[in-house]
Amino acid sequence: MDFLKYIYCSLIVFLFTILFSYGQDEEMYAPVKEKVPLELKGLKFGLNVGRFSDYLFKPERVSYETSFDFNLNHKYFGVFEAGYSEIELKKDNYHYLSDGYFLKLGMDYNMLKKYPSDFLGIGIRFGWADFNQSASNIIIDANHWSAYTTSINPESLNTYWLEASFGIKGEIFKNVYFGWSALLKIRVAGGKNLNVQPYDIPGYGNSTKGINLGANYYIYYQIPFNRK
């Protein structure tokens, strides 16, 4: 697993390096062009359809995620993402509950020139999650005494992380797009608790790791205004 994480991180760093070098070459050899001011060219609303896989692979979790991206001259995209997650995990010796939401704010950069309405590029996000968790019917075995049952009262936790992405968005029908992105998440603060380690952090994932990998699968609809 550590080896796969190393490959994943190296790929993200490699892509950022290529983009940085490409930008320097353009400035050195390309003719000087007048800078085009940023202008809103479109707005996409997206639904993360990959979350529906929870019904098959993580039936204890129900989660939703949406995205808004603001097209600024087909090169830069302001991105706002939000979601909700609810977990109910029943085991023989405990009953765990968790629910909360997350927000992500960031930018994407489009490396495509020939098909500006599509997207191939990288992005950066700042993520924040706020969630509650509790546990009941916790059965603790004692060596010299009979087993006893306890519980942990509801508690609120926050988590902050940085997220790098590499992804694509392609128009499959008029104003309808499909998108995929690979994610690298680095926790900055929060997400740890001395009583009960969170089972899953909304938007971030495994709470025991300082770095998480992930992927998103989105269906987008572009609101058709100011589009040529």
Image (tube, helix red, strand yellow):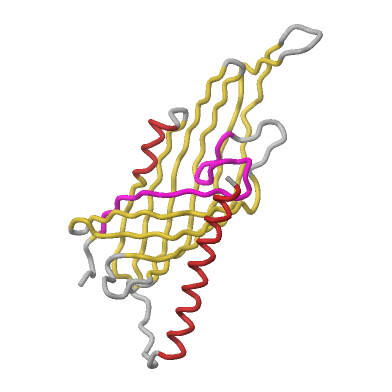
At 54% across and 56% down in the image, what residue appears?
Answer: 7
Relative to 1, 85 lies left or right = left
Q: Residue lying furthest top in this view?
A: 146
Observer-nearest of 68 and 108: 108
Residue 203 image offset from top left, x and y in percent: 50, 45
Q: Residue lying furthest front in this view?
A: 3
Residue 78 image offset from top left, x and y in percent: 41, 64
Residue 175 image offset from top left, x and y in percent: 21, 59
Using the rendered view, name the quadrant where residue 166 is placed.
bottom left
Using the rendered view, name the quadrant where residue 44 is placed.
bottom left
Residue 70 image offset from top left, x and y in percent: 36, 64
At 31% across and 61% down in the image, what residue appears?
Answer: 43
Viewport quadrant of the C terminus: bottom left
Using the rendered view, name the quadrant where residue 147 is placed.
top right
Give yes or no for residue 202 being in the magenta stretch.
Answer: yes
Give yes or no for residue 151 being in the magenta stretch.
Answer: no
Is 49 rendered above or below residue 43? above
Is 37 rendered above or below residue 76? below
Question: Which region is colored magenta?
Answer: 199-222
Q: Residue lying furthest left in this view?
A: 174
Viewport quadrant of the N terminus: top right
Relative to 90, 227 lies left or right = left
Is 55 rendered above or below residue 117? above
At 56% across and 19% down in the image, what residue appears?
Answer: 91
Q: Residue lying furthest right in this view?
A: 144
